[in-house]
Image: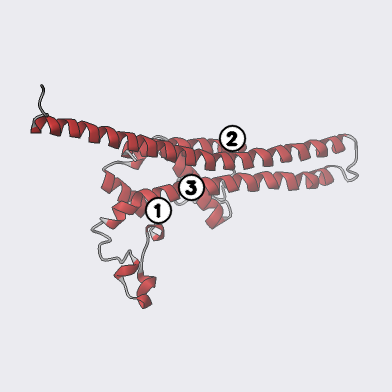
Amino acid sequence: MPGFPLSRERHIIRTRVDGSICSSLSQEKMRSNIVGLDIELEAVKGFLDKTLAAVDSEIAIICEQEDAGKFRNGIDDFANALFVPMKQEEIAIKAVFYEINALVEWQLQNLAVEAYGNSDRHMKTPKFLGDVPADQIHRIKFVSDLPFGEICRLIEKYYQIQLCDVPSFNEIQIVRNTVNDFKHRKGFKDSRKDPKVKLGEQSKPSREEAYKAIKESRNFLIALWKRLGV
């Protein structure tokens, strides 16, 4: 009759079982993260699809009216009629960029929470309600209060990675820079940071670039999660 496994054998068996459980839990968390991400991105894409479909339909009607000679003042009336749907397209594309930027920043903030709690640089910064008296709660600083660059540095140091090496990170930076152009300079690019940018040049992302932003944000976040094993 075989006896119980020896201590070393039990340790090996337990290690394999624990490793298998951890791997299974990690895979399940990854699937859950991807499902949640896809739901959010599908909502953004659906909004863009419907807005652009409505814009195309309205522009087609306006062009038919122009062909039928319904604009008495010629090109001026035609251009004025096109302004509203074209502006709606511009607003929709901007909204997509804002949403993608916010989504990625939120995910990076979540990844930086543990790193922030263990950071020597922020050791003296109160992070929890129990750390300060009630009249000093305003001193609490959350990850969401940190600049984007600091959040990236926390993640890179804690997880020992370089975000620039993660697929699609460059595209995410383009989205972020475009949003900053809209937010701070009414769409004008910052020629001080890029010598290739001409003075007065504006960010005017296209439909294709909006759809690409959605796709690349998914690629980036999934690649990052896989690299970090979260």
- The answer to which of marks 1 and 3 sits earlier in the sequence is 3
Q: Which residue is depicted at the point 25% across and 59% down?
A: 121
The residue where tag 3 is placed is 103
Q: Residue 163 location in percent, x, y?
A: 35, 42
Look at label 2 and name its amino acid.
Glu
- The answer to which of marks 3 and 2 sits earlier in the sequence is 3
Which quadrant, please, contains the N terminus?
top left
In the image: residue 75, left or right of residue 97: right
Distance between the alpha carbons at the discs numbered 2 and 1: 26 Å
Helix, strand or loop status at disc 1: helix
The residue where tag 2 is placed is 208
Look at label 1 and name its amino acid.
Phe
Distance between the alpha carbons at the discs numbered 1 and 3: 13 Å
The residue where tag 1 is placed is 148
Helix, strand or loop status at disc 2: helix
Helix, strand or loop status at disc 3: helix
